[in-house]
């Protein structure tokens, strides 16, 4: 199969590589770029373990072809941390025990990051609906919701203090 030149920005860094157009973005990220945060869970877009942010929206990278990502700006869990530490959202997941085995956590946090940009002051019901595309087999979701609500409150307090 003919290869194509793929150019994209991943976590703020330009990347350029030869790929087969049918390669899936999750494998390009994991195997070609060494970013193992997005996990391969179901290969059908049901679980959300592979969630990344692409051009300002959450996508399941197991159903995005490399060709579709050409020219895109992609952020993975590796690109969300604060310099030298955790982001507010990552810290909230840690403090509120929003993870157990951790397999779904990168996708959960990446989706929650975009969700809080879309809805900075959500209700608990809105969090549950906004995160419905990401499955967790361990936690029962309550602590995930608590973590997202706590991060939203902290981010809003920071925004208000800056105004």
Image (cartoon, rainbow, N blue to C red):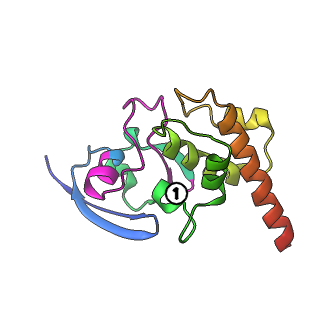
- Picture layout, residue 43 above or below residue 156: above
Q: Quadrant of residue 4?
A: bottom left
Residue closest to the eye, 148 or 16: 148
At a point 75% along the width and 51% down the height, the residue shown is 152
Q: Circle 1: is it few (<14), some (14-19), or many (20+) Cα within 10 Å?
A: some
Is residue 128 among what the camera can see?
A: yes
Residue closest to the eye, 49 or 57: 49
- Picture layout, residue 108 above or below residue 18: above
Q: Position of residue 60 (x, y in %)?
A: 46, 41
Question: In the current view of this chain or complex, which residue is farthest to the left?
Answer: 1
Magenta stretch: dominant SS? loop
Q: Quadrant of the C terminus?
A: bottom right
Q: Position of residue 45 (x, y in %)?
A: 45, 32
Q: Is residue 14 left or right of residue 20?
A: right
- Is 55 inside the magenta-drawn segment? yes
Q: Is residue 15 left or right of residue 145?
A: left
- The residue range painted magenta reads 27-56
- Say how many tags the image has: 1
At a point 86% along the width and 66% down the height, the residue shown is 160
Q: Position of residue 49 (x, y in %)?
A: 46, 38
Q: Is residue 50 left or right of residue 145?
A: left
- Picture layout, residue 146 above or below residue 82: above
Residue closest to the eye, 64 or 148: 148
At a point 66% along the width and 47% down the height, the residue shown is 115
Q: Position of residue 127 (x, y in %)?
A: 72, 38
Q: Secondary structure at mark 1?
A: loop
Q: Quadrant of residue 69?
A: bottom left
Is residue 75 among what the camera can see?
A: no
- Is 156 inside the magenta-drawn segment? no
At a point 52% along the width and 57% down the height, the residue shown is 55
Residue closest to the eye, 58 or 156: 156
Which residue was labeled with disc 1?
A: 55
């Amino acid at each position: 199969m003919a290869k194509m030149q793929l150019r994209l920005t991943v976590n703020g860094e330009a990347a350029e590589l030869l790929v087969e157009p049918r390669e899936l973005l999750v494998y390009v990220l994991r195997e070609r770029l060494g970013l193992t945060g997005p996990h391969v869970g179901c290969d059908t877009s049901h679980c959300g373990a592979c969630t990344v942010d692409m051009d300002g929206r959450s996508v399941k990278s197991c159903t995005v072809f490399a060709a579709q990502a050409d020219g895109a700006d992609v952020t993975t869990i590796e690109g969300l941390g604060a310099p030298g530490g955790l982001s507010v959202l990552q810290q909230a997941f840690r403090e509120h025990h929003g993870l157990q085995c951790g397999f779904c956590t990168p996708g959960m946090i990446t989706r929650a990051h975009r969700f809080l940009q879309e809805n900075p002051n959500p209700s608990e019901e809105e969090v549950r609906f906004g995160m419905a595309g990401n499955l967790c087999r361990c936690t029962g979701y309550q602590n995930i919701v608590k973590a997202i609500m706590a991060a939203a409150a902290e981010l809003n307090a920071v925004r208000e203090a800056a105004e």
